[in-house]
Image: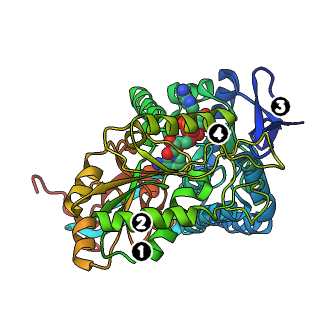
């Protein structure tokens, strides 16, 4: 059984102390253990990162970017292995893991633009013979804390941009899916990243709290559930850190009466049930405008769901893998029980699905509810499983009001043929990422990713241009040189 430790100063560290089992969710068996760093181990990683910072901050951005070019090649060369590691611990099908990795690689590609991104701003003759410029200096040691559901991609949203900006990083990934990220950190070192610039500590609350409280950590990037995101934001701020904390979601799709129903249904099936619904951008609510659209939508979804194939993620002919743990599967089942008890109509019931080759896997089939109401728990809370709720309304304004009233504001989309309605929707909806006939409007790496309301605590979104600002501190320099009389120069005469 593999023991997954830490990588500090480029060295593999097998610590002592607490460990946690790492499951293959398709088989339901523990196939490894991960070490949970204690405070001393995390503080050691911070010290190492702090020591590496002076040399790394003075390394020209071009040289930092060159490491990223090599790293990208290595990610591509070893993509199959990375995806197998993702699938064996997360459960998603290999094709889906490849999609995740591709989006991660795009963030590495963006990071190769560091020399361009860090050029700064310059004003010649801001005053008479006075020049002024703003430069973007690295912060020092930054922490990255990530969730289980994108074991490769979310860490790649963070640390490549942090390091090309000149920072040194302590990365604390999810203890539930630690192997892919560990392998990726090994590849980063193979690409030439100097020791100490990127350090990996596995762990749980103890490790996170140490990162939040240590005064040497300047900034924290977090992605995970909303209660923990809020805690990380508050606790980090309390200790004087810059924090961006991305949280949970309840993403709605509005289905207008004029929508292309066939394409809408196909898009919703992928967006609701891909990765078993364990995506922060998954569509978990479809708001149908008018009963005619609702009836067509529900019957179409029901028919399409009959052919969703659930099984091990190692078999690419499957559409959906298992959920992350048995405990989480039971929690999702409980939500479905609650929905039934609260009076929603369970049209497709996937609660008792079993996969014959893997009777102990954490599988659950896709579920569809109709007639869901805003006061129901299945509507209010993030389920993070393969459960799609249909809410019926009479007008687009009512659909938008529902979305604007919800506590989360991560992603949303509208399916329509009406450009005017789509434009009104994108202009007025209180959500950070909006799709128009696009069910999963995940921004490309050269934009930035972030929700509104309780889906993001902090001012700057993840990756893209916002990441350059998050991982740097602006300094503005104003300069003048006295005239020697030989050449034209600045005048120092008081009081001008
Ligand atoms: P989680 O909040 O349980 O864990 C996230 C990280 O926080 C992990 O590294 C974990 O070790 C740490 N953590 C857990 N409990 C903690 C505690 N009590 N104190 C301090 N640290 C703690 O989230 P998860 O289950 O791994 O991931 C799923 C959640 O992440 C969902 O809510 C999903 O919507 C969200 N998510 C959001 C985005 C986004 O971009 N907004 C992206 C992916 C996932």
For label 2, the residue is 297
Identify the element where label 1 is drawn.
helix
For label 1, the residue is 261
Q: Is residue 268 visible?
A: no
C-alpha gap between disc 1 and disc 2: 7 Å
Quadrant that contains the N terminus: top right
Residue drawn at (73%, 55%), measured in percent from left and top?
188
Q: Which marked residue is nearer to the observer: mark 3 or mark 4?
A: 4
Q: Which marked residue is nearer to the observer: mark 3 or mark 1?
A: 1
Q: In this view, does 189 lie above or below 424?
A: above
**Picture quadrant of ligand 1:** top right
- Which is nearer the N-term, disc 2 or disc 3? 3
Crowdedness near tag 3: few (<14), some (14–19) or many (≥20) residues, C-alpha within 10 Å:
some
C-alpha gap between disc 3 and disc 4: 17 Å
Q: Which marked residue is nearer to the observer: mark 2 or mark 3?
A: 2
Identify the element where label 4 is drawn.
loop
Q: In this view, does 191 lie above or below 418?
A: above
Q: In this view, does 13 lie to the left or right of 325?
A: right
Q: Which residue lies furthest to the left in this view?
A: 495
For label 3, the residue is 14
- Which is nearer the N-term, disc 4 or disc 2? 4
For label 4, the residue is 174
In the image, residue 196 lies at what x, y percent?
Answer: 70, 43
Quarter of image, res 491: bottom left
Q: Which marked residue is nearer to the observer: mark 1 or mark 4?
A: 1
Q: In this view, does 28 lie to the left or right of 160?
A: right
Q: Is residue 433 above or below residue 2?
A: below
Identify the element where label 2 is drawn.
helix
């Amino acid at each position: 059984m593999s023991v997954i430790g830490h990588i500090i100063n480029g060295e593999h560290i097998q610590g002592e102390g607490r460990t946690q089992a790492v499951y293959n969710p398709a088989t339901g068996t523990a196939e490894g253990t991960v070490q949970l760093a204690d405070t001393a181990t995390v503080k050691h990683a911070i010290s190492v990162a702090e020591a590496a910072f002076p040399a790394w901050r003075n390394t020209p951005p071009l040289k930092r970017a060159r490491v990223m070019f090599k790293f990208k090649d290595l990610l591509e060369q070893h993509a199959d292995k990375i995806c197998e590691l993702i699938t064996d611990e997360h459960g998603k099908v290999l094709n889906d893991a490849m999609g995740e990795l591709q989006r991660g690689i795009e963030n590495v590609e963006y990071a190769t633009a560091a020399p361009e991104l860090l050029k700064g701003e310059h004003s010649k003759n801001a005053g008479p013979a006075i020049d002024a410029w703003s430069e973007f200096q690295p912060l020092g040691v930054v922490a990255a804390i990530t969730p289980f559901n994108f074991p490769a991609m979310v860490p790649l949203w963070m640390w490549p941009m942090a390091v090309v900006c000149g920072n040194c990083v302590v990365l604390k990934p999810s203890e539930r899916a630690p192997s892919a990220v560990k392998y990726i950190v090994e590849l980063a070192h193979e690409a030439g990243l100097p020791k100490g610039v990127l350090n990996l500590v596995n762990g749980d609350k103890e490790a996170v709290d140490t990162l939040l409280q240590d005064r040497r950590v300047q900034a924290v990037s977090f992605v995970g559930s909303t209660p923990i995101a809020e805690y990380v934001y508050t606790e980090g701020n309390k200790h004087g850190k810059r924090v961006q904390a991305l949280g949970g979601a309840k993403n709605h799709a509005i289905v207008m009466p004029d929508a292309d129903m066939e394409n809408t249904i196909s898009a919703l099936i992928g967006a609701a049930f891909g990765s078993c619904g364990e995506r922060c951008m998954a569509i978990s609510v479809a708001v149908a405008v008018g009963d005619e659209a609702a009836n067509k939508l529900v019957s179409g979804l029901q028919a399409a769901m009959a052919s969703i194939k659930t099984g091990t993620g190692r078999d690419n002919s499957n559409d959906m893998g298992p959920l992350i743990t048995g405990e989480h599967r039971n929690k999702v089942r409980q939500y479905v029980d609650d929905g039934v008890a609260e009076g929603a109509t369970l049209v497709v019931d996937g609660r008792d699905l079993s996969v014959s080759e893997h009777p102990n896997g954490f599988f659950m089939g896709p579920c569809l509810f109709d007639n869901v109401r805003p006061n129901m728990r299945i509507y209010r809370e993030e389920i993070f499983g393969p459960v799609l709720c249909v809410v019926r309304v009479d007008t687009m304004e009512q659909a938008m009001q529902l979305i604007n009233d919800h506590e989360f504001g991560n992603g949303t989309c509208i399916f329509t043929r009406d450009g005017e309605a789509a434009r009104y929707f994108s202009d007025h909806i209180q959500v950070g990422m909006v799709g128009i006939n696009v069910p999963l409007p995940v921004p490309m790496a050269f934009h930035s990713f972030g929700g509104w309301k309780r889906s993001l605590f902090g001012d700057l979104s993840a990756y893209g241009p916002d990441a350059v600002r998050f991982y740097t501190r602006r300094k503005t320099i104003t300069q003048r040189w006295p005239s020697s009389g030989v050449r034209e120069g600045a005048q120092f005469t008081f009081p001008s």
